[in-house]
Amino acid sequence: MNKSYQILEVRAAEGGARLLVEIEERVGEARQKEVLSLLCARLTRLPQRGGISLEEVEELRREAAICAAIGAGLRALGASGSSRRHLIEKLRVRGYSHDVAAAAVEELAEKGYLKEEEGALREAEKGLAKLWGDRRILADLQAKGYTAGALKYAEARLRTEDGAARCAQLIRKRRLCLSGEEAEVRRSVAALMRYGYTMQEIRSAQKYTKK
């Protein structure tokens, strides 16, 4: 049996920011309805009541998925900063296709909701709070997909910190040993390097731990 589609109703929501479009699918005597939530700003033309092709229905469904993904992206950004790549990955985990997730992230970036520089700074602050070394903080940012431009902001922030003093804080917190039995010293140094500290920072940290 052939399918046909009809737009039954188009109504505004959220002060006109969104449109709710009710579509009916007809197969013989069977009827099935769905309501799609669309962002008006993304539509090249407003849907009208009446018959509609399958291709047009699929495009409206895609726009509805992007609208939902934008909402999910906003909620994710409210919880923490993010790079474009990482936000796309988060949306993929939530069940959105790569195409839809990428379109949603692009929209968020264009509207100023996704600012990688601010996200990178926020993530760098989290690393500092965990007493990570600069190397680990920057490696974490790269793994999360931040661009080179965003990393420069984080690097500038890290330059204002004393890495050796931070390393000394970690030594005291973890009760690591940098003198005495050689095997114990090696284990402590290895632990500090996993946290992202250089040998120079580790050596310099000793002057703080002796105070």
Image (cartoon, rainbow, N blue to C red):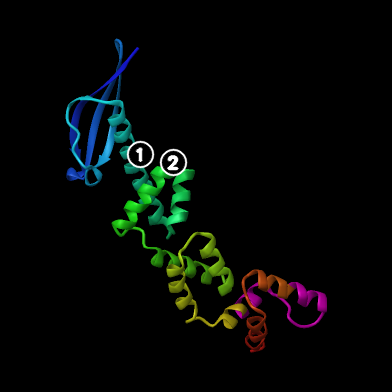
Q: Which residues are magenta?
A: 168-187
Residue 35 lies, in percent from the top left, at 28, 30
Q: Is residue 39 above or below residue 132?
A: above
Q: Secondary structure at mark 2?
A: loop
User: In the image, what residue occupies the spot 30% across and 57% down?
Assistant: 110
Looking at the rendering, in which quadrant would you find the N terminus? top left
User: In the image, what residue occupies the spot 47% across and 49% down?
Assistant: 90
**Mark number, residue 65:** 1
Q: Quadrant of residue 166?
A: bottom right
Tell whether label 2 touches label 1 (CB within 8 Å).
yes
Question: What amino acid is labelled 1 in the image?
Answer: Ala
How many numbered tags mark residues here?
Answer: 2
Viewer-side residue, 69 vs 148: 148
Viewer-side residue, 18 vs 50: 50
Mark 2 highlights which residue?
Answer: 97
Q: Secondary structure at mark 1?
A: helix
Residue 200 lies, in percent from the top left, at 65, 83
Image check: 132 left or right of 26? right
Q: Quadrant of residue 9?
A: top left
Question: What amino acid is labelled 2 in the image?
Answer: Ser
Image check: 162 left or right of 42? right
**Magenta span contains residue 72:** no
Image check: 107 left or right of 183? left
User: In the image, what residue occupies the spot 79% across and 75% down?
Assistant: 184
Return the disc, 1 or 2, that comes first in the chain's sequence.
1
Q: Residues within 10 Å of mark 2 (few under 14, many from 20)?
A: some
Q: CA distance from mark 1 to mark 2?
A: 9 Å
Residue 48 lies, in percent from the top left, at 17, 31
Looking at the rendering, in which quadrant would you find the C terminus? bottom right
